[in-house]
Amino acid sequence: MAGGMGGVFPDGKNVTIKVEAALSEYQGNLGDFSYLAWDWENKNLRLHASSSRTFGNFNDLAAATANEQILPSSGILSAAVPRAIDQLTVSYGLPDRQLTFGGGAIHYSQADGTETLLISANATKSFRSHVTLFANAYIDSLDTSNFGFGVGVTMPLGGVDK
């Protein structure tokens, strides 16, 4: 059984604060979850900071279902809810050039205590033909063998509303 509540609170014209909390009981174990986020945006610049934490043995519906039906006794794979996720991101857009740059850091603490600190950068360029090019890269600063990058293109396959 699980239940929760949350809210989104605008603070002025540029700031939004999000708050969530939840409790769960699964197989006799109790746990709770909390989330707090702060978003600030002006014409071209966006900042995001958020933090989530679990306490006790918190399980959401996805974790409980996956652990029972998909990964019943796997020591390698887990659908457990992470202990902590902390994010700090920034993006800057140039609307007249349809160009956006961004980057951030994400701290991730798995249920087993394993820690990750990802540092990322990204860029997106859109064109009038509704084609978008994007590139992103990341590295785990706690394990530099964990890194990656991606580049891609998106384009509509059908008609596009003008």
Image (cartoon, grey):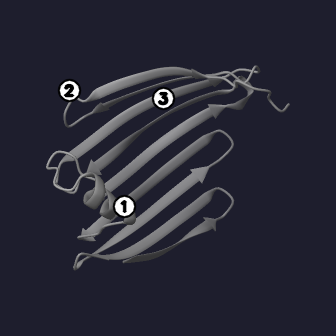
Residue 127 percent coordinates (x, y): 71, 20
Q: Are marks 1 and 2 in contact (CB under 8 Å)?
A: no
Q: Secondary structure at mark 1?
A: strand
Point out the residue furthest to the front here. Answer: 69
Q: Mark 1 or mark 2: which comes first in sequence?
A: 1
What residue did someone put label 2 on? 145
Q: CA distance from mark 2 to mark 3?
A: 20 Å
For residue 154, what is the image quadrant?
Answer: top right
Q: Mark 2 or mark 3: which comes first in sequence?
A: 3
- Compared with residue 124, is residue 36 higher up or lower down, i.e. above or below? below
Position of 22 with respect to 67 (left or right) is right
Label 2: few (<14), some (14–19) or many (≥20) C-alpha neighbours in 10 Å = few
Q: Which mark is residue 52?
A: 1
Q: Residue at x 54, y 38 (%)?
A: 91
Q: CA distance from mark 3 to mark 1?
A: 23 Å
- Compared with residue 22, is residue 88 higher up or lower down, i.e. above or below? above
Q: Secondary structure at mark 3?
A: strand
Q: Residue at x 39, y 23 (%)?
A: 149
- Compared with residue 123, is residue 72 higher up or lower down, i.e. above or below? below
Position of 126 with respect to 73 (left or right) is right
Between 80 and 150, the one nearer to me in the picture: 80
Amino acid carrying mark 2 in the image:
Ser
